[in-house]
Image (spheres, rainbow, N blue to C red):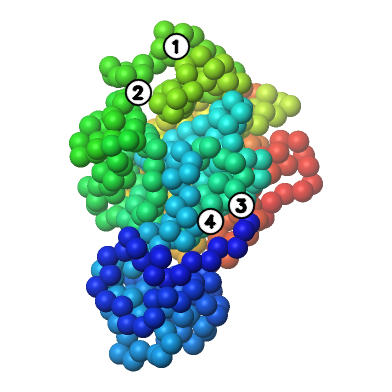
Amino acid sequence: MATVVRRLEELLREVDCTGIKGDAGIIAASLEFDSRRISPGSIFFAIRGTSYDGHNFIEDAVSSGAVAVICERLPGKLKLKVCYVQVPDSAEALGIMASEYYGNPSRRLHLTGITGTNGKTTIANLLFRLFTAMGHGSGLISTVGYQINDRKIPATHTTPDPVTINRLLFEMNEDGCEHCFMEVSSHAVVQKRIKGLHFAGGIFTNISHDHLDYHNTYDDYLKAKKKFFDDLDHKAFALVNKDDRNSTFMVQNTKAMVKSYGLKTMADFMGSIVEKDYSGMLLEIGGREVFVKFIGSFNASNILAVYAGAVLLGVGSDEPLRIISTLTPVEGRFETIRSDKGVTAVVDYAHTPDALENVINAILPMLPNRSKLITVTGAGGDRDKVKRPVMAAIAVKNSHQVILTSDNPRSENPDAIINDMLKGIDKSDIYKVLCISNRLEAIKTACRMAQKGDFVLVAGKGHETYQEIEGVRHHFDDREVIRSTFFNKNKTTG
C-alpha cells in the first residue's frame, strides 16, 4: 500500500472545529484513537466510549509522540509543539478525517451498505460473489471476513473502525475495485464509524430483538438502523424489505431513491417460492424461475435482496439470475454436514430469537416421518439478557430435544446464562431439555443421540473458530466437533 501523508489542516476541512490551539500545518503520520498505539507523528482522537473516556489518556498519547489531539474538551495543561483541536464530537471528527486522510476512497467506487438484524452477512457476501463472477473488481467488509478481490483479510468487527474502513477502501481503490459491499451494524451507526463515507446505496433486511444490552430499548435500536438511511444522499438508492413492518419507517426521512422487495407484500421487486426440497428452492423472481442452493423463506428473501441490489447497481436483470443459481450458502449460515449414518447437522450463526425461529422453521419441513430435530443453543455472555429466555422458549417449542449450552460466555458464569434461558421454558416442556454447559460435550451428545433421518441444529456461533471464556479466546469450531463425532476422527476442538 502506498504511504499516505496529509497535513492536519487538510484533514480538518470538513470538520466543525470550535477551537485550534497550535500549528495545524503539521504532518499526520497516522490517526489513532487508542493511546497504546500512538507512535511519533500520530494524531490522537480522544473519544468517549461506554467503558473508557479517551480524554483521560491525552497525556499518555502526547508522551508517546502524538503531535496533535482531537478532543471535545481541552486538557488543563497544553504541551508546546502539540496542536489541540476542539470539536463537538470526536468520534464524528475521526470518521470525517479518516475519509479525508485516505483521499475519500468511498467516492471512487460504489459502496453499498447492508443493515438489519438478520441477513446482512448473507446479502453482503452473495453480492460480492455475484459481482466478482460478473467480472467487476469488488471488495467486502463483513462479519466473516474482509476481502479485496481475491485477497482475504481476517475480520475484527462486523463494521470496523473508521480508520480501518477507509484503509480497506483505499486498498480497494488501488486494486481496481469498482464495488464494495459492507455490513453496517447498529453499533457502527451510533458510534459514527461510517461518518464521512459516501454510499451508492443501502439495503434494509429486517428488524428483530437484538443488542438491547447496548441500545437499552427497541426504539433506540430501530432509530440506529434508520439513521443510516437518513444520511443517504439523493443520488443513492434505499432498498427495503417490504415484508418487514418497519420498512416504511426506515426510509421516511431519506433523500435516497426508495425501492422495495418482498415475498408476501406488493413491492418493486417481487419473488415467491415455487418448490423446495433438501437441495434448495425453485424461486420465481420478476416472472422468471431460478433454482437456488439455499433453504428457507428467510434465504429466499435474502436472494431477492441480492437480485434487486444488483439491478439497482446497474448490471441488468438476466445475468444476475444466472449467477445466483450457482451461488452456495455463506460460511456458517445454514451450513450442512451429513453423517454416513444419515444424520444431518446444520451449523448456523442464529443468535437472535427471530433468526433461530427462521432456521428451525426451515428444517422442520425437511424432517422425514418420525424423525427428530435436536437443537443445541446457548446465549452470549455480557450481552442482551432479555433474549435468553425467549430463545430457549422458541427452541423448546419447535424442537423434539434441546440441549442448552455455552456460546461465548465471556466474563459470565456459563451456568448462570443457562439458568436465564431456563426461565423461558414451561415446566410441562422441561422433559425435552438437557443442560450441558461444556459446548464440546453438548454438541457430541446431540450428534450421538441422533438417529437416521434426524437433524441436529447447532446454533449461535456459525463461522466462528473460537470460544471466549473469561476474556480469553480458545480455538473452537462447531463444525470440527461435528465432523470428529460423525466420522470418528480423533482430533476434536476444545
Distance from label 2 to label 3 (Cα)?
A: 32 Å
Secondary structure state at the residue bearing disc 3: loop
In the rendered structure, which disc, 3 or 1, sits on the residue that comes first in sequence? 3
Secondary structure state at the residue bearing disc 4: helix
* Residue appearing at x 29%, y 30% in the figure: 257
Secondary structure state at the residue bearing disc 1: strand
Q: Which residue is mark 2?
A: 261
In the rendered structure, which disc, 2 or 3, sits on the residue that comes first in sequence? 3
Q: Which residue is mark 3?
A: 154
Q: Amino acid at mark 2?
A: Tyr
In the rendered structure, which disc, 4 or 3, sits on the residue that comes first in sequence? 3
| Residue contact at pointers 2 and 4, CB within 8 angstroms | no
Relative height, residue 30 to residue 142 (above, below): below
Q: Percent x, y for residue 2? A: 62, 58
Q: Amino acid at mark 4?
A: Arg
Q: Percent x, y for residue 129? A: 58, 32
The answer to whether one can see residue 380 in this image is no
Q: Nearer the viewer, mark 4 or mark 3?
A: 4
Distance from label 2 to label 1 (Cα)?
A: 13 Å
Distance from label 3 to label 1 (Cα)?
A: 36 Å
* Residue appearing at x 71%, y 26% in the figure: 341
Q: Nearer the viewer, mark 2 or mark 4?
A: 4
Q: Which residue is mark 4?
A: 167
| Residue contact at pointers 4 and 1, CB within 8 angstroms | no
In the rendered structure, which disc, 2 or 1, sits on the residue that comes first in sequence? 2
* Of 110 and 208, the residue lying toward us: 110
- Left or right, 262 with respect to 126, comes to left
Q: Which residue is mark 1?
A: 284
Q: Residue furthest front?
A: 25
